[in-house]
Image: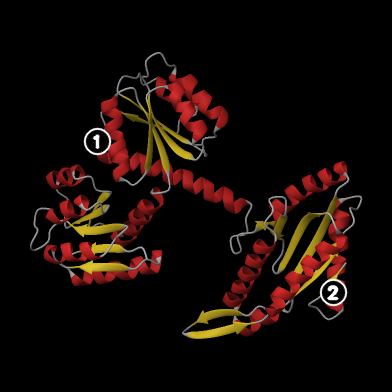
Amino acid sequence: MSKILLVDDDKIVLKVLSKIIWEKLKMPSDQVLSFKDLSKVVMENSYLLSICDYHLPDAEHGEAIDFLIKNKIPTIVLTASYDERIREEILEKGVIDYLVKGTPNILEHIIYVLSRALRNRNIKILVVDDSPTDRALMKKILKNMLFQVFEASNGSETLEILKNNPDIRLIVLDYYLPEEDTVELIYSIREKFKRNEVGIIVVSGIIKTSMIPILLKAGANDFLSKPFSKEEFMVRINNTIEMLDMIKELEFYAYRDPLTGLRNRRYFFEEAGKLWTLAKRQNSKLACIVIDIDNFKKINDTYGHNIGDEVLKDFAKHLKDFFRRKSDLIARTGGEEFTLLIGYEERERLLEYLENLRKKIEENCLKIQENSEEIKIKYTISMGVELDLKESLKEMIISADHKLYKSKERGKNCITF
């Protein structure tokens, strides 16, 4: 299991950090009080990251940090107070970041920096600069921040790398590239990637102030003047990535049900019409299925809404397992109601498949740990299935919904088609 290493001579600090890291990130941690114990622990374990106090009783000048970096353990440094000399010294060591213990909301900040660093490991950044020295400097800082780093020296290399690595999230782009029009290069990137898909930070030390808004209007997300401090560079990078993540999350939840992770009602009705139109044009078979969890109100009333939420998530997981094709449209369209549009070839095979889903849910026993007690929940589902491609999508949904009510009238836990 992945672990975090905590190094501090204050037992209370270690206890609090360990507790909050488990609560917020669900990650276990090992705790070390001295430099003497540090080498033994590192020899016997592997760690994703470490949080280390700068001063230890037997290592007063950051020796523990040097040891951790030497052993390739990415490190966040804690210091008792802000000191310009120590700050520069810490950053030169190649740490992820440093934090001052007395800062307001320091625990929240530690969790933020820690979780940000963990997420950075899966993020790709492209550094574009014709100067090998400048590229190496930026690449080193970004690698210390745990990013995956690519590099290019000109526009054509940049576009080729983006073509082969479309999941690159951020480009750090030098304004002055010999024989290149940076604005045109930004336009070329923006033809393929929106601002919220790939961020661009332009860096330069020889640019007129009047050019900065032109670059931003062309599609850059931010501008950074050279020479820059390591700390400013790190903050600008993290801020831009954080903004991209926030936009991505907002877009995700605009069309997703936050509880189950399935598509929501809005997405369903935006996409369902397209599927219906395509099926009508191609004269292909399309089924509309409306599913309802039986006696869901009783589950909520008996066990509480938190248990009801677990039931919804459990059923959503089964739906995802059963319907994996990209063309399958599955959505939570009401409290305990789910609507599906599924292309099919043989009527009997589809009905058999739906019956297998019904049986799977009927036989399923959901086990939930609640206040040191295991609660076992059994639930069933009812379905209404419209197999004919009606004259409108609305007719199909109304028909499937009507058949769902028939299933309820028949005693629930069944399929009407």
Give the answer, above or below, for where 290 lies relative to 83. below
Which residue in the protein does label 1 denote? 229
Tell me if 223 is positioned left or right of 308 in this view: left
Tell me if 254 is positioned left or right of 117 in this view: right
Tell me if 241 is positioned left or right of 276 in this view: left
Looking at the picture, how far across and down is residue 272, in whole percent? 77, 50
Find the residue positioned furthest to the right.
Answer: 391
Looking at the picture, how far across and down is residue 86, in whole percent? 14, 47
Looking at the picture, how far across and down is residue 57, in whole percent? 8, 63
Give the answer, above or below, for where 207 lies relative to 53. above
User: Quarter of the image containing the N terminus?
Assistant: bottom left
Q: Amino acid at mark 1?
A: Ser
Can residue 296 be seen?
yes
Can residue 216 be seen?
no
User: Quarter of the image containing the C terminus?
Assistant: bottom right
Q: Give me the residue at 66% from left, 69% from top.
A: 315
Q: Quadrant of residue 209?
A: top left
User: Disc number at residue 407?
Assistant: 2
Q: Secondary structure at mark 1?
A: loop
Tell me if 326 is positioned left or right of 193 in this view: right
Of residues 6 and 165, the one nearer the viewer is 165
